[in-house]
Image (spheres, helix red, strand yellow):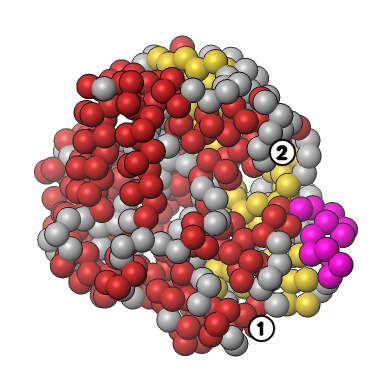
């Protein structure tokens, strides 16, 4: 079996090789997953060489054969699975996304609002090129997309590949697992499918989650038909185990009556988020430019120490993730329980394993609103959204593919926020596909985190001025 990683010079690639090596040795969480070759594709030969030196230095026993190329068509030909993990414009592009928006007093986070839309405009044309190459050269392949902003990129790629491209994120299922752990349940049981598959003597464990990528809510967690979420919401000691409750405040989480995805911090506390980020010496993008730029330079000079250098930087990166959501006293690092949800590579490999081996698993994925049509005679997953809208919901995955599960009706402020943001996402997709700057302006001006059409215009002009790619894409 052949796996292609688009964005193969990316920093997290060795984590995937580590898990695949364990699987080939019959150990670790995926003993049935046997990948013979991993083909790394990237536009940067230098980054590919550095990551190859990390993998060689760490010397994972039983690792699959790893090859690399800067030729897209050579990369995808004959692939069985493709992981899309591209960062178009690199960390320097992220800095521009952040700073242009912040100069106008608007959040520039890479997946939420203005910063995410600049990222999407740069990325959609490249993602479409990848989708067409897969369609032509590996039509049987599954594409697992964690290129951000994942919901937008997945929806664009589906216009070429249909349901064979699935978007993933580790945040939603991580929230479910950490909630189960806070209640004294086994987090591993959240993936189980079938009667008696979870919860031990208490019976199966179920959950209801709905939203968009980086915008969703966990609304129930059931054991033997009893929802345990109210118990957690009513107990400050239990809520203290969840980073989302600590950053948003236990009172607000109780007021909602559900647990929000961690990225909703940027919506519920937008003013505070922007202020904290503007007060920092560096944005997250600037931190990564220094940290990872330094790593790639050092590893290129000393390939024999590449593994050691990579491991050190990985620890620092994980500890500082979304630091602006935490109070100053908690900035030094994250609790171990906050890191226990896994990562993108775990979700991708869970999905890949279920499809490849046929062993069913339950997870939360980015799929189309109408993907459940015909499964049970029901309609759209979220009836208020378009049929092709990509939403984030629980799914069962097996050898026949991805099967979205029905969710409880969504209403009120949550539905309003979700519908507004999805409408803006669809405008930005159309802007990128059709080269229309007016649609990009509408997308920015309509977003709930941008409070003025004139501010939106200035942000868009800033992106076109600082990003030649965006100007070209929008016909300027």
**Mark 1 vs mark 2: which is more N-terminal?**
1
Q: Residue at x 39, y 70 (%)?
A: 265
Quarter of the picture holding the N terminus: top right
Q: Magenta part mainly helix, strand or loop?
A: loop
Q: Between residues 289 and 339, which one lies in front from this camera angle?
A: 339
Query: Quick check: can you spot residue 165?
Result: no
- In this rendering, would 282 be left or right of 427? left
Residue 231's disc number:
1
Answer above or below: position of 166 versus 257: above
Q: From the image, tell me which residue sits under label 2.
A: 354
Q: Secondary structure at mark 1?
A: helix
Quarter that holds the C terminus: top left
For image coordinates 81% across by 74% down, the residue present is: 225
Mark 2 Cα within 10 Å, few/some/many (few <14, many 20+)? many
User: In percent of the image, x 66 and y 73: which residue is there?
Assistant: 183
- Residue in front for this viewpoint, 428 or 355: 355
- Between the C-alphas of marks 1 and 2, the distance is 32 Å
Counting from the top left corner in percent of width and height, residue 313 is at: 33, 42
- Viewer-closest of 357 and 132: 357
Magenta span covers which residues?
192-204
Question: Residue 151 has which mark?
Answer: none
Image-based side of 129 in relation to 182, left or right: left
Where is residue 24? Give x, y as percent: 66, 25
Is 365 a magenta residue? no
Where is residue 429 shown, x and y percent of the image?
A: 39, 46
How busy is the neighbourhood of tag 1: few (under 14 within 10 Å), some, or many (20 plus)?
Answer: few
In the rendered view, tell whether residue 298 sits above or below residue 281. Answer: above
**Residue occupying image coordinates x 68% and y 70%:** 184
Camera sees residue 195: yes
User: Is 325 above or below relative to 358?
Assistant: below
């Amino acid at each position: 079996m052949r796996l292609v990683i688009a964005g193969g010079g990316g920093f997290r690639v060795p984590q995937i090789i580590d898990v695949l090596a364990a699987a080939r040795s019959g150990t670790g969480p995926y003993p049935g997953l046997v990948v013979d070759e991993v083909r790394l594709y990237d536009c940067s030969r230098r980054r590919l060489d550095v990551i190859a030196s990390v993998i060689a230095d760490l010397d994972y026993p039983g690792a699959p054969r790893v090859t690399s190329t800067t030729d897209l068509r050579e990369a995808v030909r004959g692939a069985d699975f493709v992981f899309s993990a591209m960062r178009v414009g690199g960390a320097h592009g992220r800095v521009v996304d952040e700073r242009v928006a912040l100069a106008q007093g608007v959040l520039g986070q890479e997946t939420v609002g203005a910063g995410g839309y600049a990222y999407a405009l740069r990325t959609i044309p490249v993602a479409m090129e990848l989708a067409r190459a897969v369609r032509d050269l590996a039509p049987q392949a599954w594409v697992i997309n964690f290129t951000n902003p994942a919901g937008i990129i997945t929806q664009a790629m589906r216009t070429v590949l249909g349901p064979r491209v699935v978007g993933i994120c580790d945040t939603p299922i991580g929230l479910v697992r950490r909630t189960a752990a806070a209640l004294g349940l086994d987090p591993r049981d959240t993936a189980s499918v079938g009667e008696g598959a979870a919860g031990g003597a208490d019976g199966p464990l179920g959950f209801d989650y709905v939203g968009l990528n980086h915008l969703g809510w966990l609304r129930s967690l059931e054991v033997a038909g009893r929802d345990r979420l109210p118990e957690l919401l009513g107990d400050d000691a239990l809520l203290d185990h969840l980073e989302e409750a600590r950053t948003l405040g236990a009172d607000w989480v109780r007021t909602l009556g559900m647990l929000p995805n961690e990225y909703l911090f940027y919506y519920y506390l937008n003013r505070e988020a922007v202020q904290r980020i503007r007060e920092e010496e560096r944005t997250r993008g600037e931190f990564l430019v220094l940290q990872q730029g330094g790593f790639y330079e050092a590893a290129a000079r000393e390939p024999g120490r590449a593994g050691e250098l990579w491991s050190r930087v990985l620890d620092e990166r994980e500890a500082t993730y979304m630091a602006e959501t935490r109070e100053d006293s908690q900035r030094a690092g994250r609790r171990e329980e906050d890191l226990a949800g896994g990562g993108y590579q775990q979700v991708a490999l869970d999905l890949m394993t279920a499809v490849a081996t046929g062993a069913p698993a339950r997870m939360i994925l980015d799929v189309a609103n109408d993907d459940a049509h015909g499964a049970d005679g029901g309609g759209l997953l979220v009836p208020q959204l378009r049929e092709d809208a990509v939403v984030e919901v629980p799914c069962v995955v097996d050898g026949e593919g991805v099967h979205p599960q029905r969710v409880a009706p969504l209403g009120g402020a949550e539905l309003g926020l979700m519908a507004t943001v999805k409408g803006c996402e669809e405008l930005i997709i159309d802007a990128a596909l059709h080269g229309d700057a007016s649609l990009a302006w509408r997308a920015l001006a309509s977003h709930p985190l941008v409070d003025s059409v004139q501010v939106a215009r200035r942000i868009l002009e800033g992106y076109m001025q600082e990003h030649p790619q965006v100007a070209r894409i929008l016909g300027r």
